[in-house]
Structure formats: structure tokens, C-alpha cells
DNA sequence: TTGAAAGCGCTAACAC
DNA sequence: GTGTTAGCGCTTTCAA
């Protein structure tokens, strides 16, 4: 089961020294192409698998890829984790995952802890300040998900386009005044979505009422739903689906028809969104692809190119949106 | 940041050899108590952190704890993962997580892959046959979650008591004929819940109609809901919340009032259950505690004691259940 | 372009 | 009860 071939065996089979074998397998340009191929064939034939512990011992660098995220119970991050994990495994590596419970201090501790094991990190929505993130990026390769820090590589869904699509959809249905139920004030995604809202309003003739900042879930949804009703909007766009779920729940409680009296749009399109009654119109963010892309940026031989990669999003229109009442 | 103290430094500080230092830190009974304490104090003072790669290289055993689960996108397993991960971190270790996409072959591949990295595994609802699981347990310490295999340690929620509580609740409301919408036929949990159903019927005067086996989610829920209606039951107990969600969605589609015409009870109590409209009555299974307990069994110096640990569950009564219509 | 050899930090024989 | 020492499998100077 576990393979027994050592580098020395490969070297012997290829009639070279272990040093040359090591270089050949690492793809060093200094070895002759012929030698390299010979070594590689020998390795393949013997089913050689490098001993990562030995490599780590000498290089001091962990081979795993770590994923640090705020909350596995949030289906969006679970999706990111699936993507990361699948891509990492395809590479023959293992993914270490750490949940920070949305706490910046836990986050710092966690990162320090995985340091010895993983020299490559995917940081999803990190709570720590820019400087701290940059400090981490000094000693490890880092890719951010849903967060932008000057000088670092990052991946995100197209927040601006997502809210634009949502607004266009609502406008097409006839809505002219919609409320935005925001996420936590410290959230980079929320800020990005708010910027998108401002930009979109220049092209879509629609009034956006800021309902405030809410914690996702039922407590936040309760407040947001009541405010939406009071604000006399005909539709609400929620920062994310969890918040939209809370809103939907509260509206049902108060006997407010959705979409009859109020249309509701979510963001993220978590799997349960389509199972709700009514199924929730939501901006589909390819969570697993965010994870996969982040890993791919980490796989190269060098530090990933700084800059923000934006993945396309798409509005999934379901039954929580309709024309506004008369 | 990263600590520089080596075992040799600790040994020097404690005026012993590295061998003694190693033994002392490992808690070997052969070292004198006084020496052991001296070494431990020195280690603490220097902030010594063992180099796991070095240890692994010599022992051949990975230090991480791996969690293999069928689907991170299922909130129940996300909960297990949170529990595992938190407990593992508290131990100063790292958790490797691998998602098998509910596929037995992927599962085997994944386990082989994490083998070199982790000598302790938490296997959640493994799909592989008993023999294969036992084979894995030969070469690594294994604790199962939601699965029982003769001779191995396992942790699960109290399935029998969960369905009993659900039935008692429904009976108290006046229901006398309820449908059970089962999970996949290969699921150990489903079998356990069905056994519970049989046992409970001896004490609760209620007729249980087997609606069949369904895949969780909207497709399964659709079929299950229609069958429930046709079976003329006044309540449905679903194998898990995801299936209950699908049922709820389908009932809303067909304009069937819940709980007015049909009461619905889920199992697992995933976080969204309480956000639904109506909030779902469900059997709360302490997912994170299952994970935590599994890790604790793995932490001891020996192979975990075989046998099934059953954690208590509790029915969360919400608004999806009520008296049957006159 | 290749090889010899020195460790990386730790554990586990084996001696004392 | 404690110390000495030989590796674990690999990468990486340094020489050739």
C-alpha cells in the first residue's frame, strides 16, 4: 500500500547519484535533459513518492496548503473549502483547514500555528488589519479570498457586477426603490458591494435605500426586514443569503407576502437558497471556484502575482422576486 | 515569531542529554520525576516547540489528525468539521480535511493520500465496506462518526432516542399516522433511525408509514412530499434536515399548509432549520461535539477503546409541527 | 553537468 | 536512570 521506493532507489535505477536525482525531479535546469528524463521515467516506474517529512525537515517549509476561514458553518465558506480541498488533493498534497470563528485574534493564533506545517496559505475574508496580513505574507505564500490587500494576490467574485445584475433585474420588474441590507461594517465584501451599488445607480434608474449594517442570520434579518417595511421599498437586496434567510423568516412571521408585497434578493447563492419557499433569487458566487483559483495561484514556483482576480457571478432568478404590487 | 529553540537547547538548559530530554517530554516513565520536571520547565521557559517534521521523519507517523467526510456542503458535516478542527487546534496540532463527495472510491483514495501525513483519522459516515474500514484501522488510529464497525471506536448521536422523541412529540400533538422519509439505503444513520422507529412504536401508539428512501435535497424532497400527501399521513419525519427542506419547499409549491395540513420534523437541526418559514422542528444532533469527542478518543496514547459512544440528542420544537387538522 | 557528503531535528537502540 | 550514537529521506553546498 504505502510505497517503499526511496530517492536512492530511483537514483540507482537511473544510474545517477541521489543529488542528480533530486535535481532532476525538482526540475532544476542545470541537469541535462536526457538525464532528467531518465530519472523521471525511473521514478514513475518505481512509483516513487517523495517523503514530505524529509523534505520539510531540510527545507524548513511545510508542504501542505492551509485554508484559514471565518466560519465553516457558513455554506459559502464551506463551498470555498470544498474547492480548495479538491484542488489541493489533485496535486497530491493535503489541505489543513482552520476555522477562526470570525475572531481576529484567533485568526492570528491559527496562522502562527499552521505556519510550521504549511508555507502556502489561503486566507478567506481575514479579519486582521492589512499590516498583519502583509506580515504573514512575508514568511509564507498567501492568496486572499474576498479581501484585497495592496501588494498581495487575491480572488473574489465580481461584487460590483453582482449588485448591478440584481438592480437591473429588479428594475426590469418595475422596482424603483429598493433597500440594501448591509453586512458587518468591517467586511471587505460589504464595502465592495456598496461601491457596486453606487456605480450601478448611474446606469440603472433606481433608488437604493441603505437599511444599515446587520449580522447575518435571524437576528439581523429580523431588524432588516422591519426596517425594509418601514422604508417603503418594494424590494430588498441582502448582503448575503444568510441575512436574506433571516429577512424571509421575519417577513413570513409578519405575514408579509414574498414576492407579493416585497421582493427579496440574496447574494452568494448558497445551496439552501433554492430549497426555500419561495426559492430565493440570489447572485451566484462560484465559491468552490474561488477556492480552486486561490490554490492554483499558490501552486506556481514563485510567489503569486499580486493583484485582484475577479470571477464572474451570475444572477439566479427564482421566485422571491416579482413585479411590485400595484 | 517562529521559535528557534531546539531539543538540544532544552537539554542543555536542563543539563541532560537530548535523549533524556526527549524521553522527559514524551512522558516516558523511565525518567526520574525530578529530571522530568526540570526538563519540562526548561522547555516551557525556552518556548520550545517540537519540530514535527523531524519527529515524523524518524517515527514514520504523521502528527496531523485527518478528517474524512462525505460532503462539507452538508451543514451537519460542516459542524462536525468545526468540532474536530477546534479540538485539534487546542492540542497544538493541525487538522487535515478531505471531502469525498460521497464516493466510496474517492474515499479510499483520499485515505491513502492522507496516510503519510496523519496517523489518526476521524472517518465521518464512511461509504466503504466494513472490511476496508478495518484495513485502514490496521495502519492508523481510527474513530468513526455515524457508523459502526465491529471492533472499532465510534461516536454517534442517539438516533433511536431522537426518533423516539420526535414520535412522542407528534403523538402528544394528536398525530396517529406519520410518514418516515428515509435517507439513502446505504446509510448507517438511516438504518439506525429506522431501528429506532420500530422500537419506539412499541411504546408510542402511532402508525409509521415508510415513504421510501430519498436523496436529501430538493429532488428527494419533491418525491417524499408527494408520497406523504398520497399516504394520508398527518405528519412526516424526515431522515435529515436537507430532505426536510426539500419536502417543505415542495409542500409550499403545492400550496399545502405547514403545519396546518401536514406537520414536518427534521433530523440534525442544521443552523438554517430555525431560519425557515415556518422554522423547522428538528432533532438537534450535537455535530461539533461528535467531532470533538472523536478527536478526544484519538488523543490518548493508545488505540481508542472499541465501542459506540452515543451522544444525547434533543428535539427542538418549532413551528413546523402542530396538531393535525380536525 | 554530476557526485560526495554534510546535515535538517528528532527518536530509539544500545550501552553504561 | 541517563548518555552516546546511528540513522529517518531529503536538499544543498562544495568540488570535480
Image (cartoon, coloured by chain):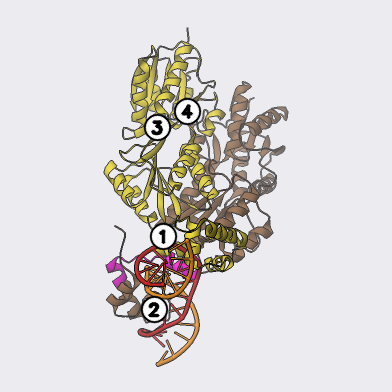
Chain colours: A yellow, B brown, C orange, D red
Residue at 49% across, 67% down = A18
Of badges 4 and 1, the one in the foreground is: 4
Q: Quadrant of the N terminus of chain A?
A: bottom right
Q: Measuring from the top left, give residue B143's x and y in whole percent.
A: 56, 59
Magenta: predominant secondary structure element? helix
Disc 4, SS:
loop
Q: On the image, numbered disc 3 is attached to which residue?
A: A219
- Residue A313: which numbered mark, if any? 4
Q: Please tell me how crowded label 2 is: few (under 14), some (14-19), or many (20+) other residues with Cα within 10 Å.
A: few
Q: Does residue A212 appear left or right of residue B284 in this picture?
A: left
Q: Are marks 3 and 4 on the same chain?
A: yes
Is label 1 in contact with label 2 (beta carbons under 8 Å)?
no
Q: Are marks 2 and 3 in contact (CB under 8 Å)?
A: no
**From which residue to which does the magenta span run?**
B41-62
Residue B204 at x, y percent in the picture: 66, 43
> Helix, strand, or loop for circle 3?
helix
Q: Is residue D3 above or below residue A242?
A: below
Q: Are marks 4 and 2 in contact (CB under 8 Å)?
A: no
Cα distance, mark 2 to mark 3?
57 Å
Q: Is residue A94 visible?
A: yes
Q: Residue at x 29, y 48 (%)?
A: A135
Q: Residues within 10 Å of mark 4 (few under 14, many from 20)?
A: many
To which residue does mark 2 refer?
A: B19
Give the CA separation, mark 4 to mark 2: 58 Å
Amino acid at each position: 500500500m504505502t510505497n517503499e521506493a526511496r530517492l536512492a532507489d530511483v537514483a540507482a535505477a537511473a544510474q545517477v547519484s541521489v543529488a542528480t536525482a533530486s535535481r532532476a525531479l525538482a526540475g532544476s535546469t542545470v541537469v541535462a535533459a536526457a538525464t532528467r528524463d531518465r530519472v523521471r521515467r525511473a521514478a514513475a516506474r518505481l512509483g516513487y513518492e517523495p517523503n514530505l517529512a524529509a523534505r520539510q525537515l531540510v527545507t524548513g517549509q511545510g508542504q501542505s496548503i492551509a485554508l484559514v476561514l471565518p466560519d465553516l458553518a457558513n455554506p459559502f465558506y464551506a463551498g470555498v473549502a470544498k474547492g480548495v480541498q479538491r484542488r489541493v488533493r489533485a496535486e497530491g498534497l493535503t489541505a489543513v483547514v482552520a476555522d477562526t470563528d470570525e475572531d481576529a485574534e484567533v485568526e492570528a493564533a491559527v496562522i502562527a500555528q499552521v505556519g510550521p506545517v504549511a508555507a502556502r496559505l489561503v486566507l478567506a475574508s481575514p479579519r486582521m488589519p492589512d499590516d498583519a496580513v502583509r506580515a504573514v505574507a512575508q514568511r509564507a505564500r498567501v492568496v486572499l479570498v474576498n479581501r484585497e490587500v495592496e501588494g498581495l494576490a487575491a480572488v473574489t467574485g465580481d461584487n460590483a457586477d453582482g449588485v448591478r445584475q440584481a438592480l437591473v433585474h429588479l428594475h426590469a420588474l418595475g422596482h424603483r426603490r429598493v433597500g440594501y441590507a448591509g453586512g458587518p461594517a468591517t467586511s471587505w465584501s460589504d464595502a465592495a458591494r456598496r461601491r457596486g451599488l453606487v456605480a450601478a445607480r448611474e446606469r440603472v434608474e433606481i433608488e437604493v435605500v441603505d437599511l444599515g449594517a446587520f449580522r447575518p442570520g435571524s437576528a439581523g434579518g429580523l431588524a432588516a426586514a422591519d426596517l425594509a417595511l418601514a422604508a417603503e421599498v418594494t424590494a430588498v437586496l441582502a448582503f448575503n443569503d444568510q441575512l436574506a434567510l433571516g429577512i424571509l423568516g421575519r417577513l413570513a412571521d409578519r405575514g408579509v407576502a414574498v414576492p407579493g408585497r416585497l421582493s427579496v434578493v440574496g447574494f452568494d447563492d448558497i445551496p439552501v437558497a433554492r430549497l426555500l419557499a419561495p426559492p430565493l433569487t440570489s447572485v451566484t458566487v462560484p465559491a468552490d471556484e474561488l477556492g480552486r483559483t486561490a490554490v492554483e495561484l499558490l501552486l506556481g514556483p514563485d510567489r503569486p502575482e499580486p493583484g485582484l482576480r475577479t470571477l464572474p457571478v451570475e444572477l439566479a432568478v427564482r421566485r422571491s422576486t416579482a413585479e411590485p404590487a400595484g
